[in-house]
Image: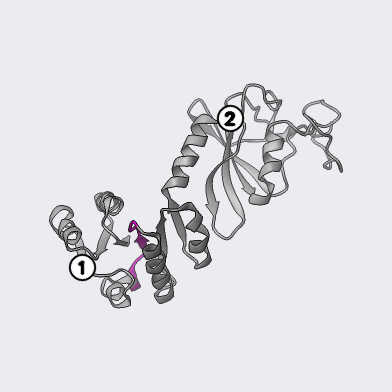
Amino acid sequence: MYIIIVGLGKVGYFLTKDLMSKGHEVTVIEARPDRYNRAINELECVAMLGMGNDPSVLEEAGIERADVLVACTGHDEDNLVISHVAKILYPKTRVVARVNHPKNEDIFRRVGIDAIVNGTSLFANVIEHELTQGDLVPLLTLRRSGMEIVEITLPDDSPCVGHTVQDLYLPSDSVLIAIIRADHAMVPRGATELQAGDEIVALVRTTQEQELRRALMGEWISSNNSRGHAATEEPKERPRGLQGFLRRG
């Protein structure tokens, strides 16, 4: 794979080093002479001294054959311009942009950037993942699809514990794609029984996240608590409280 990296700060340096160690062809574009020399002398990679938002520099770097361009300078405004110019010149090249301020993510999405990496959001998600149970933690947003891959850990007191996947009233645009139990991943089936501490990975439409959380936390339980009998249709009204995670018997 041919990858162009614009910006050789700490992130760009170690990203270049890692990609090269995996056998990828990498070209670095850097405006600062000291960092350019570091790319040449320490990383021993192909490097260009210039501005990554200059179309002539991008063309000289071979963007027309690049699989990916990564804009990873330390400034959001620079990464935005670099990414936008690259997408205008060569729409087929996938562009990954580093975003330092979470509030700037929406601007990057509007100009059609393929993937956005926000270190602050990543750290926040990791902390949420490690410290919370019973809350949905976003893992991945599928660009322009309105869908997310999320994870939730079942606490000991979840009414879902001891019941099967087929008992659940899941939102219409959601599916459970994996259950991680004691460091072992499994594909959930209808007869899979849920246990306390299960890490459930699901695909869900973003507008139905809270419905999914309520389903997995047992806030929707049918009036008939018999198990193993799938309902023919979902109840028209779900009772309040710990009501409705089981299907009607």
Res 49 label: 1
Label 2 crowd bin: few (<14), some (14–19), many (20+), radius 10 Å: some
Classify 225 as above or below 145: above
Q: Which residue lies at the image location 45% right of the left edge and 56% below the top edge?
A: 116
Classify 102 as above or below 89: above
Query: SS at mark 2?
Result: loop
Instruction: Tell me, yes or no, whether the highlighted magenta stretch contains residue 69.
Output: yes
Classify 181 as above or below 210: above
Q: Which one is in front, 198 or 189?
A: 198
Find residue 87 and report its horizontal and vertical position in percent: 43, 71
Find residue 81 and report its horizontal and vertical position in percent: 40, 69
Amino acid tagged 1: Leu
| Snapshot colouring | one colour
Find residue 206 and report its horizontal and vertical position in percent: 64, 50
Q: Which residue lies at the image location 55% right of the left edge and 31% below the top edge?
A: 132
Contact, mark 2 vs mark 1 (Cβ under 8 Å)? no
Query: SS at mark 1?
Result: strand
Q: Quadrant of the C terminus?
A: top right
Label 1 crowd bin: few (<14), some (14–19), many (20+), radius 10 Å: some
Q: In which quarter of the image is residue 235?
A: top right
Q: Quadrant of the N terminus?
A: bottom left
**Which residue matches tag 2?**
133
Q: Which residue lies at the image location 82% right of the left edge and 25% below the top edge?
A: 226
Q: In which quarter of the image is residue 163?
A: top right
Inter-mark Cα distance, 2 to 1: 49 Å
Q: How many marks?
A: 2
The boundaries of the magenta stretch are: 64-74
